[in-house]
Amino acid sequence: MEFGDAKVVEFRGEVLKVLLVVAMCASAARCISLVPAYHWIGIDILTFACGVYFVVMSTVHLQFRAGRWQQSTCARFCLGATLALMLLGLYTGSELVDNKPWQMLFPIVAFVLAGSREGVFWCVAALAGAVTILFLRGLEYASLSIFIFAIAHMTTSYVIYVFMMRNEANIRTMSRLSHTDSLTNTYNRQLFNELSISELNRARRTEEAVVFYMIDIDHFKKYNDRYGHLAGDRALRNVADVIRRSARRASDLVFRYGGEEFCVVSSGMSIQEARFLANNIIEGVRALGLKHEEGENGQLTVSIGLSYHQEFDGCSAELLLERADDALYMAKSDGRDRLVLYSPAQHHQLDLLEAIT
């Protein structure tokens, strides 16, 4: 998922929380106002439906806040229950619908919660259902109501659709510009701090392994000094392209961590697959054939430190990154142009080296 998409989803999530609370309060108030305290036998169908609606909204609210249901599932439950209640109100001739404020509100809610594409589906479903019910109530009642409803609904839906499409595009563009490294077109370090934590939390919930790669271009300062900064920039772009081609799964996140360092965060793979991805990056950079007289074998190469974790007790993104960085240090100490997998013994060895120096 693009970071701009994540921001859109985050906004929809906040709106959904508010709408669920509003829906719960409104349906509860509706039930209380329509059911006399002394007479529970004569409950009409709309009042009963409001009670069911309250139960549905409360359940969705609890599941969403607990993180047990996905946001898209909660939004669909919310929209489906709301549409069903509104169509029932239209069929029974409730004053809630005769005033028709929801004709304007429902398209707005649908587009905000479901997005521009799925919002179209909900608006078409609402229009089709309402027109059908108006016909069922009789052509005499429906003749003017259908015309007014259709015009209002389609106009509102079109305006909101155009607005949402432009708004989502603007959010994605602004997020991409502010969180993408302009030189390599990878995510930048600012975004790493946020996405690495969210990816770790997601892997913890799904009980998947998570992998941190620290990738450093060998002797890059010497490369810049000898061949110039323009050549250095081209080398950075070429290496970034190799990394992206290797880490091409939807869950693979590629960052320029700083200078000539890149970081990749992946999840849901075995240790063999993690090694395979890292070796693909190393071989891909070798295959570029970029001349570097002071590099390994006379060409530009990279070293990679890999931190692979399946147990998350006491682990944080900072700790996993530190372990990948320790492994990278060992890869450089062992001669560069290679992959080193983190182990606790390496951390102890680094402590000894620091004590000696």
Image (tube, rainbow, N blue to C red):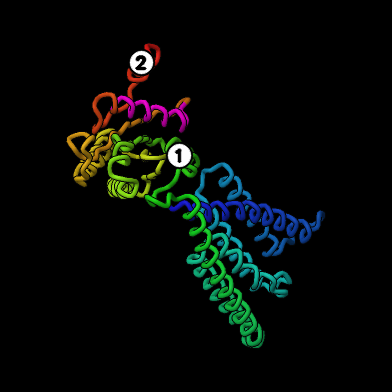
Image side of residue 346 versus residue 10, left or right: left
Q: Is residue 167 magenta?
A: no
Answer yes or no: is residue 247 visible.
Answer: no
Query: In the image shown, does 257 or 196 lie closer to the viewer?
Result: 257
Quadrant location of the C terminus in the rendered image: top left
Which disc, if any, is residue 196? 1
Give the farthest residue toward the right. 38
307 to 237, vertically: above or below: above
Q: Which residue is mark 2?
A: 353
117 to 222, vertically: above or below: below
Query: In the image shown, does 168 or 339 lie closer to the viewer?
Result: 339
Give the residue type that dot 2 points to. Answer: Leu
Query: In the image shown, does 4 or 231 lie closer to the viewer?
Result: 231
184 to 350, vertically: above or below: below
Q: Residues within 10 Å of mark 2 (few under 14, many from 20)?
A: few
Q: Are the residues tagged 1 and 2 within 8 Å (C-beta)? A: no
- Could you say where residue 210 lies in the image, as x and y percent from the top left? 38, 35
- Could you say where residue 141 lies in the image, as x and y percent from the top left? 66, 84
47 to 207, vertically: above or below: below
Answer yes or no: is residue 85 visible.
Answer: yes
- Could you say where residue 344 lies in the image, as x and y percent from the top left? 35, 19
Residue depicted at 61% across the width and 74% down the height: 156
